[in-house]
């Protein structure tokens, strides 16, 4: 509608903000009715109120069925109910309230030859419509001084939504099990940060509760409720509890670990000597500290971390993070396996698996190493010689191979453990999907039976199968998510690099993904990487 339109507006005869209301618009193209629905428990607009209004305005020729339908639908959209009325020389004051009631507009329409309006008439009109909050008197004055100018004459106050609950941690969980790195990128093996030890009563975290938010107010003076913040469950695991004001504390001294996103405090086993005949094998749910060495043929296994102050000589050690301060002498028996990192002074004639990094301060000799991310050998000698060293993303050393041209395989973009997990997951999903299909078929047969005459044992079977179905669907979804994570990791491995700070001797074989490059001459200060389907050699960086 153009600037020559004349607009009159009436609200329903209620003062409740939740009541419906209507507007009658008079324009050159006809008389239009807009009906807005009530909110909450408010009252709807009634037809007789509109008919009385039309009678007062002397509007003729309206379509009663259209009015009834428009009131019933209350769509908030203008509907033509009558032809345009004859022009009037009376000025009109138009006040419109937005659908969300957070804004109202004012426009004074003064046809040629009409009398001037007064400010009292303008304010009275605003009052009649019900606009009481957020009046912009400067804007009202502008509209009064300039007939035809449409202004926003009132604005509501928007509510402020509440803040979601969150957990504030008082312990450092990011660097756990990661040796500190020096400024030049080398590993500081004197500061291993292997364990997060807490004592009974220590403050671990705090649950900050959600806030309700701050209500707003619309231009009709009614409150606008905010969206309250969402609550969360506290991450309470074993041996922790929540006390006053949401504070989460340890109820015993021990090692802090996170399992399934929950805080747990588990005890630490300390062996004040060697793991040998005097101790037997050790398999523990928490963390293990061995003050001596692990002797040949013995097993140390932990769901948490393992720290060995001495050596591992032909023994087997498994844990989340494994630190062997004096080194690993594999003796071609036993192995070291960590779901995260392995840290050692040296590794010789050993088999080592790490889900993340293998960090060695001196040498790796004639060993089989597999790391999900990095193998770093950067100590006094920083040597990798003999054997096969594989990493998902990077191998870094000072010297690789020997002047005697000993066979040494270095490979990146390869993670056997991850590949094995990937294949197992795919096979397991196939089995679960077959079981799920059989379960759904059985449920379909049971549901097709007459429920009223179905025996009790069939009802119980249907309940068991329904629960099993939901469990199977959840298992499949979890496995598919893990497969997606592994595929992302495989993609990142394509950019793997092998960096050697000092010397690469002949006899070394460089492997990046499916590409192979034998080294036939001595190289220094180099980086090997894959590009355009071949292994290239660049400067060390």
Image: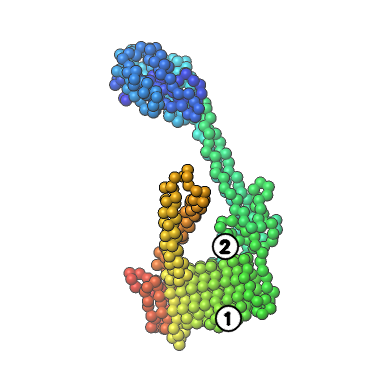
Q: Earlier in the sequence, mark 2 or mark 1?
A: 2
In the depicted structure, whether residue 411 falls above or below residue 206: below
Question: Depth-wise, is mark 2 or mark 1 nearer the camera?
Answer: 1
Residue 137 in view in this figure: no
Quadrant location of residue 10? top left
Q: Residues within 10 Å of mark 1 (few under 14, many from 20)?
A: many
What is the spatial separation of the Cα atoms under label 2 and label 1, in whole angstroms? 30 Å
Direction from residue 533 to residue 191 in the image, left or right: right
Question: Can you say which quadrant of the picture contains the N terminus?
Answer: top left
* Mark 1 element type: loop
Question: Can you say which quadrant of the picture contains the C terminus?
Answer: bottom left
Q: Residue at the spot x=61%, y=73% of the render?
A: 300
User: In the rendering, which numbered label is found on residue 175?
Assistant: 2
Q: Position of residue 64 (x, y in %)?
A: 34, 18
In the depicted structure, whether residue 357 falls above or below residue 469: below
Asked whether 519 or 441 is in front, the reply is: 441
User: In the rendering, which numbered label is found on residue 32?
Assistant: none
Q: Residue at the spot x=66%, y=80% of the render?
A: 277
* Mark 2 element type: loop
Q: Residue at the spot x=40%, y=75% of the render?
A: 511
Q: Residue at the spot x=51%, y=23% of the render?
A: 16
Asked whether 153 or 440 is in front, the reply is: 440
Quadrant location of residue 340? bottom right
Direction from residue 280 to residue 531 in the image, left or right: left
Asked whether 75 or 446 is in front, the reply is: 446
Q: Position of residue 96 (x, y in %)?
A: 42, 24
Quadrant location of residue 111? top left
Q: Position of residue 308 (x, y in %)?
A: 62, 74
Q: Which residue is mark 1?
A: 314
In the depicted structure, whether residue 9 falls above or below residue 392: above
């Amino acid at each position: 509608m153009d600037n020559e339109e004349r607009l009159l507006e009436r609200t329903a005869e209620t003062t409740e903000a939740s009541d419906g209301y209507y507007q009658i618009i008079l324009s050159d193209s006809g008389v239009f009715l807009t009906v807005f629905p009530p909110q909450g428990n408010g009252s709807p607009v009634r037809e007789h109120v509109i008919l009385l209004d039309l009678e007062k305005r002397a509007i003729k020729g309206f379509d009663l069925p259209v009015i009834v339908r428009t009131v019933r639908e209350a769509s908030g959209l203008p509907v033509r109910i009558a032809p345009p009325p004859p022009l009037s020389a009376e000025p009109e004051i138009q006040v419109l309230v937005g659908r969300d009631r957070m804004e109202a507009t004012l426009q004074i329409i003064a046809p040629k030859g009409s009398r001037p309006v007064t400010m009292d008439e303008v304010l009275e009109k605003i009052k009649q419509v019900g606009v009481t909050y957020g009046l912009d008197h400067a804007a009202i004055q502008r509209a009064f001084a300039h007939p035809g100018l449409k202004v926003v004459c009132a604005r509501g106050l928007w509510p402020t939504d509440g803040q979601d609950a969150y957990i504030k941690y008082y312990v450092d969980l990011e660097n756990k099990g990661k040796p500190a790195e020096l400024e030049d990128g080398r590993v500081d093996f004197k500061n291993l940060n292997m364990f997060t030890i807490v004592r009974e009563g220590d403050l671990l975290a705090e649950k900050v509760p959600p806030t309700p938010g701050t209500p707003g107010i619309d231009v009709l003076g009614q409150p606008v409720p905010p969206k309250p913040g969402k609550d969360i469950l506290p991450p309470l695991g074993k041996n922790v509890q929540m006390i006053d004001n949401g504070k989460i504390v340890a109820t015993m001294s021990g090692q802090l670990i996170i399992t399934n996103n929950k805080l747990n405090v588990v005890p630490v086993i300390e062996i004040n000597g060697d793991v040998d005949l005097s101790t037997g094998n050790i398999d523990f749910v928490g963390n293990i500290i061995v003050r001596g060495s692990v002797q040949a043929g013995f097993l140390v296994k932990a769901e948490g971390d393992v720290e060995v102050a001495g050596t591992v000589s032909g023994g087997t050690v498994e844990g989340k993070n494994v630190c062997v301060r004096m080194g690993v002498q594999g003796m071609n028996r036993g192995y070291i396996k960590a779901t995260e990192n392995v840290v050692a002074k040296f590794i010789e004639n050993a088999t080592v698996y790490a889900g993340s990094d293998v960090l060695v301060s001196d040498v790796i000799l004639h060993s089989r190493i597999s790391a999900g991310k990095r193998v770093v050998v950067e100590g006094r000698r920083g040597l990798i010689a003999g054997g096969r060293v594989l990493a998902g993303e990077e191998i870094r050393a000072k010297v690789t191979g020997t002047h005697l041209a000993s066979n040494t395989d270095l490979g990146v973009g390869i993670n056997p453990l991850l590949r094995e997990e990937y294949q197992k997951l795919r096979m397991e999903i196939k089995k679960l999907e077959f079981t799920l299909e059989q379960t759904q078929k059985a449920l379909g047969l049971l549901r097709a039976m007459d429920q009223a005459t179905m025996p009790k044992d069939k009802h119980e079977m249907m309940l068991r199968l329904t629960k099993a179905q939901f469990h199977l669907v959840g298992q499949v979804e979890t496995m598919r998510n893990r497969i997606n994570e592994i595929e992302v990791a495989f993609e990142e491995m394509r950019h793997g690099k092998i960096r050697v700070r000092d010397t690469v001797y002949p006899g070394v074989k460089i492997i990046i993904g499916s590409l192979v490059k034998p080294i036939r001459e001595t190289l220094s200060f180099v980086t090997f990487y894959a590009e355009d389907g071949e292994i290239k050699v660049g400067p060390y960086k």
